[in-house]
Image: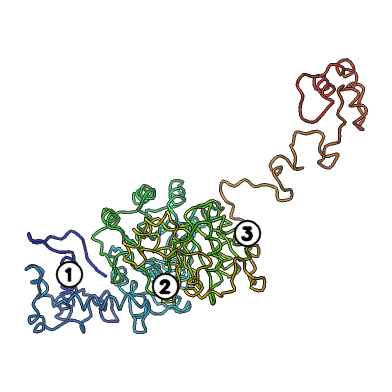
């Protein structure tokens, strides 16, 4: 963990190592907090660190006095750092780097310790504290403990923590505390904006913020694509305080004048590295141009590459970068046990079927790189007897939400998804994560396996690496400093699969019928969301003829209807007139038969599919 006000540091002319620079940042922060504390004790300053955290000691990882050595011990311990760093260390009395690293690791390793501060210890509105208590949330995670003092004071910050350690409430609680509810005179114009990269994450964040702000009467609205505009426009016109949305739909409603961003005082980019990467950056810049310049901006993610941090500083004001864990960037949750297998692509379905039969497993998420592979794996698992559903970009929004609802409720216990579900999705009870295909990079790997082992629980992550993906995996392994540089060649019959994952030796590639107890995806209702760009077809008739007409065939055929949609049989003859008289039982009028007599004897040169009577038919058309 490090906490710094800016990365623009001046160093002596000599060579300074990265460790020394990190140590200097710690020392500077220690000096800043200690100075404000001393001023508060002497009565010479009106504000202090205690104002940021009123009813508890200062943030333990950085400012607790019990870990601060005395001046005598500091003078007795010389530092082998450059002169400027040594002088700063002596003035501030900062702990040794080893002590600080150990303390940070203790804070970040256990998500919720028994002695962690309560939300009521901070300057959080009592109604929000009561709403969280009803949901069973009373104590803070490490990232919340470190960000709440700064965020409640209105400072810009960049929050980085492992997946599943409470980043949503890390920015949600300060936003809800600083927002004015309708009971206190709010006019219904959005005061806070949370931008997320995926629709599924948008729904989840809006639900969590709505739960936390329910007792205070704060209205939270989710704005995302794939749904009809009208319900979202109606909700905005009725008035909301917090808007959670994806960039595309937010821009659409803002340009149409339905979404007013002129009064936004708090802006949050959740999964910020994804938001500022690749195609999202232009949309974010357009959104930033619509919100006031005087605002609080917060960025949160589990992975925060250096270029993204540098880019984010261009639209933030003296941001503080907070990392709530002591490992390197992109570190994985220690409660998750990882298994890496080198598997053949043709044997992966059999191997996956064995993994899904592990004893005492809960819900399972299977990640694929492509949408086609995700749908193919889901269909194959259903055929093998597993209750599986797919979530990917080719599905409509209604089908995606149906699959997630069925997964959360337990009607299906296997969710096959692309990386659209790898960011921020929090489902209780996920015990296993399977990477059916090797992830693209280390960030994707961290976010994928972060769907399990959340909130201090344990989890299992299994990665199946094909032969062609070995170089890519070795790069991921090196970036995350893992011990799986050479995965063992593994097949569905390999004995270590059964021992590692506690799979019964009698397991096969199909789930036994006695274990097929889940209701399946069909048990979950498909909600009509008024999806945009969807062609509504009649549900009463099937096949390809649905869009051709109400009877299931081509709407221009005059011979349909009398025969119930079936064409009458015709006898194939060389002459048109006789064939019509003998083969068709329908009566003909005199006006139709008169011109036919003169032209039916000449056969048509071009023959069409359907048999004879072409001469009569042609003359009938001509008549």
Image location (x, y in percent) of residue 113: 36, 81
Q: What label sits on residue 23 in the rendered view? A: 1
Q: Residues within 10 Å of mark 1 (few under 14, many from 20)?
A: many
> Which secondary structure lies at badge 1?
helix
Q: Which residue is mark 3?
A: 526
Residue 459 position in % (x across, y down) = 45, 73
At mark 3, the secondary structure is loop
Towards the viewer: 121 or 543: 543
Whole-Å distance between the Cαs marked 2 and 3?
36 Å
Q: Which residue is mark 2?
A: 337
Q: Are marks 3 and 1 in contact (CB under 8 Å)?
A: no
Q: Is residue 178 left or right of residue 385?
A: left
Taking the spot 67% from the left edge, 47% from the top edge, the residue there is 537
Q: Residue at x 48, y 78 (%)?
A: 134
**Residue 139 tag number:** none
Q: Residue at x 7, y 82 (%)?
A: 76
For the residues carrying marks 2 and 3, which lies nearer the camera in this image? 2
Q: Nearer the viewer, mark 1 or mark 2?
A: 2
Q: Residues within 10 Å of mark 3 (few under 14, many from 20)?
A: some
Depth check, front residue: 416 or 253:
416
Mark 3 or mark 1: which is in front?
A: 1
**157 vs 573: above or below:** below
Question: Would residue 221 be visible to someone looking at this image?
Answer: no
């Amino acid at each position: 963990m490090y906490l710094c006000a800016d990365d623009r540091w001046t160093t002596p002319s000599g060579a300074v190592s990265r460790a020394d620079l990190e140590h200097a940042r710690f020392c500077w922060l220690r000096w800043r907090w200690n100075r404000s504390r001393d001023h508060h004790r002497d009565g010479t300053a009106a504000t202090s660190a205690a104002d940021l955290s009123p009813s508890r000691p200062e943030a333990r990882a950085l400012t607790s006095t019990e870990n601060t050595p005395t001046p005598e011990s500091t003078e007795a311990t010389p530092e082998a750092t450059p002169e400027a760093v040594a002088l700063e260390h002596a003035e501030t009395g900062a702990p040794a780097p080893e002590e600080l690293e150990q303390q940070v690791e203790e804070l970040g390793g256990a998500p919720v310790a028994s002695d962690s501060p309560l939300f009521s210890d901070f300057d959080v509105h009592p109604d929000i504290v009561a709403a969280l208590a009803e949901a069973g949330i009373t104590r803070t995670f490490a990232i919340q403990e470190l960000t709440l003092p700064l965020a409640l004071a209105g400072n810009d910050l960049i929050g980085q923590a492992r997946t599943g350690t409470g980043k949503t409430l890390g920015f949600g609680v300060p936003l809800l505390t600083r927002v004015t509810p309708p009971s206190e005179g709010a006019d219904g114009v959005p005061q806070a904006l949370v931008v997320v990269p995926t629709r599924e994450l948008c729904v989840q964040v809006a639900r969590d913020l709505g739960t936390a702000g329910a007792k205070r009467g704060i209205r939270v609205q989710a704005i995302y694509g794939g749904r009809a505009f009208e319900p979202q426009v109606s909700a905005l016109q009725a008035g909301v305080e917090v808007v959670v949305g994806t960039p595309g739909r937010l821009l659409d409603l803002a340009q149409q004048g339905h979404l007013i961003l002129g009064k936004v005082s708090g802006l949050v980019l959740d999964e910020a590295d994804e938001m500022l990467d690749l195609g999202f950056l232009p949309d974010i810049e357009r959104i930033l141009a619509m919100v006031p310049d005087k605002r609080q901006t917060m960025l949160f993610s589990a992975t925060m590459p250096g270029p993204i941090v540098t880019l984010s500083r261009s639209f933030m004001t003296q941001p503080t970068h907070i990392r709530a864990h002591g490992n390197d960037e992109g570190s994985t949750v220690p409660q998750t046990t990882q298994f890496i297998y080198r598997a053949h692509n043709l044997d992966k379905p059999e191997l996956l079927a064995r993994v899904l039969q592990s004893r005492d497993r809960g819900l399972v998420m299977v990640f694929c790189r492509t949408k086609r592979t995700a749908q193919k794996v889901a269909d194959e698992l259903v055929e093998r007897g597993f209750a599986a559903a797919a979530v990917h970009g080719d599905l409509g929004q209604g089908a995606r939400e149906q699959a997630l609802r069925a997964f959360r409720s337990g009607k299906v216990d296997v969710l096959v998804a692309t990386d659209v579900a790898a960011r921020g999705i929090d489902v209780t009870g996920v015990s296993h994560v399977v990477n059916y295909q090797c992830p693209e990079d280390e960030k994707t790997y961290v976010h994928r396996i972060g769907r399990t082992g959340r909130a201090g629980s344990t989890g299992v992550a299994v990665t199946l690496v094909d032969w062609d993906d070995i170089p890519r995996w070795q790069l991921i392994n090196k970036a995350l400093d893992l011990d799986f540089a050479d995965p063992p060649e593994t097949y569905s019959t390999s004995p270590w699969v059964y021992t590692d994952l506690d799979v019964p030796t009698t397991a096969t590639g199909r789930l036994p019928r006695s274990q097929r107890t889940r209701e399946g995806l069909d048990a979950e209702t498909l909600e009509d969301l008024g999806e945009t760009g969807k062609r509504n077809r009649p549900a009463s008739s099937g096949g390809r003829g649905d869009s051709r007409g109400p009877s299931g065939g081509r709407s221009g055929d005059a011979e349909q209807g009398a025969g119930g949609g079936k064409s009458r049989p015709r006898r194939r003859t060389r002459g048109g007139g006789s064939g019509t008289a003998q083969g068709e039982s329908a009566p003909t009028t005199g006006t139709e038969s008169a011109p036919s007599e003169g032209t039916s004897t000449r056969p048509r040169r071009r023959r069409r599919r359907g048999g004879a009577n072409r001469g009569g038919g042609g003359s009938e058309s001509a008549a």
